[in-house]
Amino acid sequence: MNEKKKRLKREKVMYIYIALFVAASLYVGLLFYNSVVYENKIYPGISVAGVSVGGKTKKEAKEIISQKVEESRQNPVFVGQGKYELNEKDLNVIYDIEGSVEKAFDVGRNDDLNPTKNYSKNISISINVDHAKLSHELIKITHEENQKVEDAEIFMEGDDLKTTPESIGSRVLLTENIHALKESLGNIEYEIQLRKRVMEPNVKEENIITSKDRIQGVLSRKIILKDGNETYNLLEKSMAGFLSFQKESTSLAYAMTLDRFFPTPITGSDVDISFDRNAIRDWAVSFSKDIDSEPQNAKLSGGGGGVSVVASSRDGKKVMIDDFVSKMADALKGSVNEVEIPIQVTKAEVRDDNLNELGLKGLVSRGYSNFSGSPKNRIHNIKTGASKFNGVLIKPDENFSFNETLGEVEASTGYLPELVIKKDKTVPEYGGGLCQVSSTAFRAALNAGLPITSRSAHAYPVQYYTPYGVDATIYIPSPDLTFKNDTGGYILIQTFISGNKLYFDFYGTKKEGSIKFAGDANATQGVSEYVEGITPTITEKEARGEGSFTAEFYRFIYDTSGKLIKKNNWISKYDSPKKYPH
């Protein structure tokens, strides 16, 4: 019996060894089979970008994937259920197909000697993309897709307190969409859904409705605003615009971060009510526009050797916004019921009480020009341009620049299109006709005996600027008209239009001595006390084409004894108008 048991035991051990041997042989056989069959091939079950490459060599896999990529990239990339299209080539997408195939080939090569393992794995293609361009395109989509979350608000309709309902917002998640798009492209999928986050409003209409009585109590305060003798009642409508609402659980900390403050007292409701200091500031800026004013110089009239004030100066006023907002906050908190509007006063430069101090003793000179026959837009531009110089003070020894005082010439500064001479054409531009203003200023400066430091004649003779030669063309930034105030005192410019004539009056201290103008160097031709009355010397007629000529005139400045102390001349070479077609 014991022998039989021993024999069975030996047989059992032998069978175990045989089974282990067979298993080991199969394992080694499978290893050998895999090492031989898949030595240069990708293991079964492996995909690249969803395309099966199992059993393929690296070269075969690369060709398959490359073909798939080329076929797919002919199509646009659809974003947001096809609402937006991106061109993959515009994003400079580069597919690392070779690197991705290498990763596929490496799967299973370093495993723990398991030849029966099922390699079910997909490998995305590594890509490089122009992040700046991709971000730019997605930001454009974001601007279109983002929906602003809005809290419920209140407003006054007559004496009734009304509410506007809240609205749920949404925000496109830019970073997540960039990652999603890159992942999709890496799997040769040319459509992605936009990742968004829903933005819930903080305050809902129902919260405000339950607090309506409390809100009405806050708005019932009577606050009076005072500006000297002027008084204004702060309207409930305005106060309602200052209110902000937050859930009671978070409102205090939130309000502190947003520069908000609470009316008193604060007692229970679904929301805390606060005043938004930024909303008050916006209102204060708008409100102050009816109070703010620029200082206005006194208007003068010269005659009889002196100067008289025909319209007194007016100080400028400007509401001090920061102080005003602080005072409004005190009133809204319940500290005060009256607010004195803080005003900064700026005195006018030319006033009844400082004319002698400025040296504004009388009319120094007048210049005028005639714009009869001008079209409507040209007249408009002349009036607009002349207004820029009315009330301008020129300091002693200042080299006055016409262009700097004129400022920007465009639609936003009040000008209309009209003809100007530009290069070799006569074309419409904003501000056409402003040379009428500069030419008139030139004449006033000439008549005052001021040194002319820069002046240019027009390219061809223009009918509005007779007598010819007494014009000054300007264009921003050049050419410019400049002259120096060498009177020793200030010069005040006043401009006005009478009929079809534009006038520039210079007030100040007139130079001693006398001035006269003539068309020749000997002061025998076309002599006049004022430059507008001269007859210039005309030469070189038709020398530069039909209608061309050269005009010349002289200015003679004498001291009180009649001695000539300065002689100037201006030569203007006018081209043919036909060279500058309209």
Image (cartoon, rainbow, N blue to C red):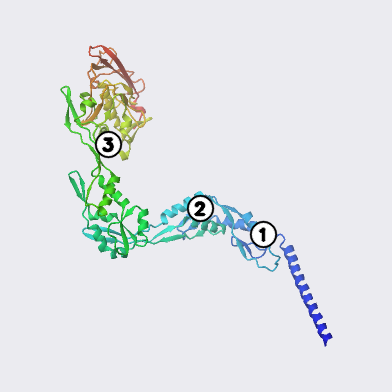
Q: Which residue is mark 2?
A: 87
Q: Secondary structure at mark 2?
A: loop
Find residue 347 and report its horizontal and vertical position in percent.
24, 35
Q: Which residue is mark 1?
A: 106
**Which mark sits nearer the N-terminus, 1 or 2?**
2
Q: Which mark is residue 83?
A: none
Q: Is residue 99 left or right of residue 252?
A: right
Find residue 526 and report its horizontal and vertical position in percent.
24, 16
Find residue 215 and report its horizontal and vertical position in percent.
26, 60
Q: Residues at badges 2 and 3 in contact (C-beta under 8 Å)?
A: no
**Which mark sits nearer the N-terminus, 2 or 3?**
2
Q: Amino acid at mark 2?
A: Asn
Which picture quadrant has residue 34?
bottom right
Q: Which residue is mark 3?
A: 377
Q: CA distance from mark 2 to mark 3?
A: 49 Å
Q: Amino acid at mark 3?
A: Asn
Q: Secondary structure at mark 1?
A: helix
**Which mark sits nearer the N-terminus, 1 or 3?**
1
Q: Mark 1 Cα within 10 Å, few/some/many (few <14, many 20+)?
A: some
State whether residue 59 is above or below residue 484: below
Q: Residues at badges 1 and 3 in contact (C-beta under 8 Å)?
A: no
Which picture quadrant has residue 538?
top left
Q: Nearer the viewer, residue 374 or 181?
A: 181
Q: Nearer the viewer, residue 21 or 435?
A: 21
Foreground disc of the pair 1, 2? 1
Query: Which quadrant: the N terminus?
Result: bottom right
Q: Amino acid at mark 1?
A: Asp
